[in-house]
Amino acid sequence: MKIVSFKTKAVKVPRAAGPLSGGADSAPFVALTIKTDEGIEGIGYAGFISDVMLKALNDSVYALTEQAIGSDPMDVEAIGKRLMTLGGTGAPSGLVTRTVAAIDVALWDIKGKALGQPVHKLLGGYRDRMPTYASGFLWRNFDLEVLGTTARKLVDEGYRSMKFRLGGEDSPAKEIARMRVMRDAVGPDVDLMIDINQGWDVNQSIMIGRELEKYNLYWLEDPTNHQDYAGLARIADALDTPIAAGEYHYGIAPFRTMLESRSIDIVMIDLLRVGGLTQWMKVAHMAEAFNLPVVSHLAPEIMAHAMCAIPNGLTVEYMPWSLPLFRDTPKVENGQIILTQRPGLGLEFDEAALEAYSVE
């Protein structure tokens, strides 16, 4: 079997503007379809970047996928290694890694379809459903009333765990007030995660983190700079609340440093920054060797496959930004995301939606 053709499409998927969007009202992606000489098609995408980088990302996806023409799509590791080298980065970083990630996912989709198996079974086959939590609904720019009202709506919709953001207030007291509103809104039995997006220094993280512990947090995410391994270790040692981090790292090597430094309690792996499903699984197994759980970042329709393949998966982030790209996505029932047994990813691009969102 050989790769014979491919197509890309740059799109902007509408979404609500939030404090992490830079005021943007859309999420940019490059949708990729790879076709083999046996008529099997695999899909993937690159994205979660700024609007100004979309054209460059589309060019990158086109240029590197073109280099895979004639390759056997079953040789996922070999293709990924060669394309990273051709990208000329010397190390995992930026658009090249995001591009290779998109290609890698499409190749796994082809492999699953060719073998008649869902990707989560090929990656490990540990289960077919996972706990999931609501993300992307509770933002820093919400006033306290809107924050509480939105949280209660999520509980009414059936979510038993959710993440919100801190790190945008000008005093610790205001940060803690937002935590208090959230806990009062959802009650004692809903798991709450907080994402700081690297917004505090080490001392702030410890000081505010200690005050937050009375609210029984599930985890505290990215409290400080992701490259400050010693600082993260100080925070993790000082707090009883588990520290989650890892989403900002490119490639697999930084995770080795993070794990050996005992910087974190929960390993969060970003699909596109790590380089695709192939590299994601390597980090997950590395975390297992350190007896640590893994959580996903973004892309729930794809990440559910990886999370269901490993024994140390904890929960899937249900961030809805990428879902409009597809005709059908995994269902969420009783707080769990459920995979089908269809071959490959079990996903199809919504071609009408892609056309509507196209920027070409």
Image (cartoon, rainbow, N blue to C red):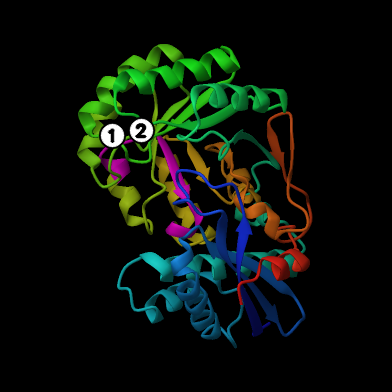
- Between 11 and 294, the one lying in front of the other is 11
Check the picture and name the quadrant holding the C terminus.
bottom right
Q: How many marks?
A: 2
Check the picture and name the quadrant holding the N terminus.
bottom right
Residue 194 appears in the rendering: yes
Residue 2 appears in the rendering: no
The residue lying at 52 percent from left, 37 percent from top is 312
Magenta span = 258-273
Q: Secondary structure at mark 2?
A: loop
Residue 197 vs 299, above or below: the answer is above
- Between 72 and 348, the one lying in front of the other is 348
In the rendered structure, does residue 263 fall within the stretch colored magenta?
A: yes
- Between 10 and 129, the one lying in front of the other is 10
Question: Which residue corresponds to mark 2?
Answer: 167
The residue lying at 75 percent from left, 57 percent from top is 346
Label 1 crowding class (10 Å Cα cut-off): few <14, some 14-19, many 20+?
some
Q: Is label 1 in contact with label 2 (beta carbons under 8 Å)?
A: yes
The residue lying at 38 percent from left, 78 percent from top is 85
Q: Amino acid at mark 2?
A: Gly
Label 2 crowding class (10 Å Cα cut-off): few <14, some 14-19, many 20+?
many
